[in-house]
Amino acid sequence: MSDVEREIIRLRTELNRHNHRYYVENNPEISDQEYDMMMHRLEALEHDYPEFDDPYSPTRRVGSDITKGFTQAEHIYPMLSLSNTYSVEEVDSWVCRVDDALAGQKTEIVGEMKFDGTGISLIYEHGRLVRAVTRGDGEKGDVVTDNVMTIRSIPLQLSGSGWPDFFEIRGEIVLPWKAFERLNEERAFNEEPLFANPRNAAAGTLKLQNSAEVSRRGLDAYLYYLLGDNLPFDTHYENMEAARSWGFKVSDSMALLHNIDEIDSYIRKWDVARKELPVATDGLVFKVNSLRQQLNLGFRAKSPRWAIAYKFQAERALTRLRFVSFDVGRMGIITPVANLEPVLLSGTIVKRASLHNEDIIHTLGIHEHDMLYVEKGGEIIPKITGVDTDKRTDGAKPVRFITHCPACGARLVRIEGEAAWVCPDKYHCPPQIIGRIEHFVGRRMMDIDGIGAETAKVLYDKGLVRNIADLYDLKADDLENIEGFGRRSAERVIDGIAQSLQVPFDRVLFALSIPYVGETTAKKIARNVRSIDWLMSLSRIDLESIEDVGPRIADSILEFFSTESNIAVIDRLRTAGVRLELPEVEETDKSDKLTGKTIVISGVFSHYSRDQYKDIIERNGGKNSGSISKKTDFVLAGENMGPAKLEKARNLGVPVISEDEFLKMIE
Ligand code: IVH
């Protein structure tokens, strides 16, 4: 086998492996730039040595985002990608190639941001959004219209005038930095895997089955490409300005450029200025402005000749590994953390970076005191992307994962099929117990103010709170002796603990930290079983018949309730007065609080069923109605309210009221 052939095979194998890490495991090991370089190198070799051609080469493959559970639609025009480069010189030579091909015609170039999200195609008929489709494999994609309709910046009905009766507009669905950070904070809190960057978060969100959750996460969309037979103008720039006037969000960074100097200074400007933007960008896109010239230039196999993407360098630093420490989470998961010599990266000092799990340590081949590459790029959480092996000290040993829990000494176990090591001693391992106390008092659980991570640890260390039931025996005097507490703040905490007796059962269930029972699952279970006693009596088959409960969750619930110490805690919570069931609707609850009001119920509820709410409305003097109109006084909205209904209520100015607000309203 020749060296060239060997190299081609090596690159293909490596690229296939990285594709899997990126698309399937959602856990890339190398930076986008390294990936692109490898791909470019393979493309070049395949071009120069066509005898080694292979229809299965990764260069032939356009990634696909097709997910089961969505219907698919063919794209009217295939959704291609852009050829890209990391060098300004290559952008300049692209301009020269375009000029040559157009034989000296005057060319204008449009510069715009390359948004780092997930591509979308929107179809409008008679000014109304009729369909939204993901990129898919470029030929066909998933229909995600319902989810896209929840994105406020996408007009459902166009304004202004002059749009063609039928057209397509393409753009990027993005999750703004702020929304991304909020989402990851929530996920960290629930010990759910974090999204590595806003792009993955946007793509994941767009494919959710629950559009109310999509709406809550706060997606946004920038549009950058208008397609159709009767476009209003024959330049890209004017068409996008027209689209802006119809109500689409078109980036203000779009600019007309006339020569290489202007292009170079556009690059210099946005390389810095993009850091101030509210959304992630990974480069710039340059497009020939005239549609006629675009047509002349045409397409290559996967990308147009009339456009090129310039990608920003990910910010990277090299620093020394001091040591690897191991954190223990609420669920016992052990996370290795690289403790680094402090280094400045994208304006912040980085001292720690998560190494996620044992596999990553091994694939990177990290040795003690290695020089490590830390990257931020689109990622908010610094990431270790590689090792400078030339700078390795002689005799350095590979970093080894621990075998015993750093907090309690228990022998670690590895969950089957997962990369994580776990400390199995749930009931004696201090960080796990403290983590559960912290979770229990959290805002979305029992909402007890004044006990944060530190206080939870002090209460545990002093022996005052060794499990969540102990909280209900706390006295103001106990707290007053703790540093940072005065009489007033101690009393406030005690008051908060008393108030927590009003927290409904579904939140109590979530607060218990049953592994894999997150907020939504807890709601669904509570709605189904209505009481903890009923839940405890269920068999595995009964459990699995509850929506969202699969074998893993069922096992976890069974294990939780077969543990004696958990039962003891639940008994004490019951004695303290914590709500362990959903209330029955009482016949006597009657009033005239809703007299004369017409109310529409929509969505799924957690405290009572839909029918019970209809009943409650009537017994309080209100009238139920099936559809929203100008006569509707308000919509009582649970989860999963359809986006079309939401939009209709908004257009008619009908208030939308949550379940909690409604219950407050009628007491
Ligand atoms: S134009 C035929 N413009 O980047 C070319 N794409 O790597 C159509 N993207 O699939 C794409 N910002 O999802 C274009 N201003 C922009 C863009 C942009 C982000 C994405 C898009 C595309 C990918 C290509």
Image (tube, rainbow, N blue to C red):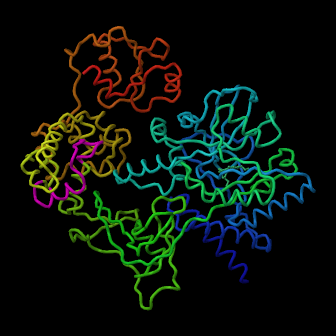
Horizontal and vertical percent for residue 552? 34, 51
Q: In the displayed structure, does residue 494 sit left or right of residue 25?
A: left
Most extreme residue toward the right is 103
As displayed, is residue 378 above or below residue 156? below
Residue pictured at 70% horizontal, 68% vertical: 40
Most extreme residue toward the bottom is 394
Horizontal and vertical percent for residue 537? 21, 40
As displayed, is residue 309 above or below residue 31? above
As displayed, is residue 248 above or below residue 475? above
Horizontal and vertical percent for residue 350? 43, 67
Depth check: 303 or 539 in front?
Answer: 303
Q: Which contiguous range is marked in magenta? A: 440-464
User: Which quarter of the rendered picture does the N terminus lie within?
Assistant: bottom right
User: Which quarter of the rendered picture does the C terminus lie within?
Assistant: top left
Depth check: 409 or 497 in front?
Answer: 497
Horizontal and vertical percent for residue 355? 42, 68
Q: Is residue 453 magenta?
A: yes
Depth check: 644 or 562 in front?
Answer: 644
Tag count in the figure?
0
Residue pictured at 44% horizontal, 51% vertical: 181
